[in-house]
Amino acid sequence: MLTKKFFKTKDETEVTFEFNRSDVTTAALVGDFNDWQAIEMKFNKKSNSFKTKVRLPKNGVFHFRYLLNDSEWENDEQADQYLANEFGSENSVVLTTP
């Protein structure tokens, strides 16, 4: 799940990435906005999901995926778009246009 917060005085968007699946013990966010380096997602007991927040430039198009249990790639069901990648699958896409 994606939630976006737009700022009136800043040229960036705060995006909250959230993933929930009962068989997942670790989750990381990877995307082109940080050269595909894994960002560990914290488990939130209240929502029973993994979450992390990232600030991205406004009016951007960013590819990302989730790395689950250090071995499985997964897309976000609520991504703004899906685009093909060089590995024969698709990436999730988040748009930061207000």
Image (tube, grey):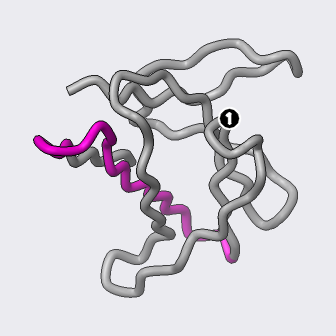
x and y percentages locating residue 87 in the rendered image: 88, 21
Which residue in the rendered view is the most extreme toward the left? Answer: 8
Left or right, 41 with reference to 54: right
Percent across and percent down for residue 38 are 74, 58
Give the extent of the magenta segment.
6-25
Quadrant in which residue 45 is drawn: bottom left
Asked if residue 35 is positioned above or below residue 60 in the image, the reply reads below
Quadrant assignment for the C terminus: top left
Q: Nearer the viewer, residue 16 or 35?
A: 35
Give left or right: position of 63 versus 16. Answer: right
Q: Is residue 27 left or right of residue 1?
A: right
Residue drawn where x is 24% and y is 44% of the image = 10
Could you tell me the amino acid type at mark 1? Asp
Residue nearest the viewer, comparing 68 with 21: 68
Dot 1 falls on a residue whose secondary structure is: helix
What residue appears at the point 50 percent right and 69 percent down from the top-left corner?
50
Residue at the spot of label 1: 32
- Up the image or down, 27 lies above or below 89; here it is below
In the image, is residue 57 part of the stretch drawn in magenta?
no
